[in-house]
Image: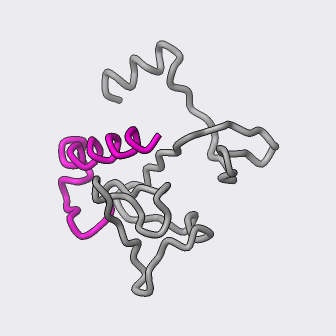
Amino acid sequence: MVTSVRGARDRGVLKAHPMFTLHTHDGIAWADGTHQPAYAVIWCTGFRPALHHLAPLHLHEHQGRVAVGGPSGTRSARDPRVYMVGYGDWVGPASVTLAGVAESARATAGDIVDRL
């Protein structure tokens, strides 16, 4: 765990929660009915696209890929609320590292801030 993440956890501003079961119109919810308002959800999928949970959003194009664009190059073309950091033709082995994804993540964060 990197120092900044450990520090946030230790200060009590970063807390782990079990996986939610539903995106709502204004946040996320769990099977027990607990609801958390959220303006944004940052979903880290890992080393391969794992997008089946996004199927209800109908993001995939006819070729099975999610078209992305926008100022950051990561915003879904079909749903501007969804960003796909680390996804697309540009990614390579370095994109799974903080250094490799930093520029894309920074551009995405800036795009999200501009939209809020």
**108 drawn magenta:** yes
- Which residue ends up furthest to the top in the rendered image? 11
Residues shaded magenta: 87-116
Q: Is residue 15 above or below residue 85?
A: above
x and y percentages locating residue 61 in the rendered image: 44, 80
- Which residue ends up furthest to the bottom in the rendered image? 62
Tell me what residue is drawn at x 34 percent, y 46 percent. Answer: 111
Horizontally, is 71 left or right of 75 in the view? left
Q: Is residue 107 above or below residue 70?
A: above
Quarter of the image that includes the N terminus: top left
In the foreground, 29 or 16: 29
x and y percentages locating residue 75 in the rendered image: 38, 59
In the foreground, 30 or 93: 30
Tell me what residue is drawn at x 20 percent, y 45 percent. Answer: 103
Q: Is residue 64 above or below residue 49?
A: below
x and y percentages locating residue 20 in the rendered image: 66, 47
Tell me what residue is drawn at x 43 percent, y 20 percent. Answer: 8
What colouring style does the render use? one colour
Q: Quadrant of residue 64?
A: bottom left
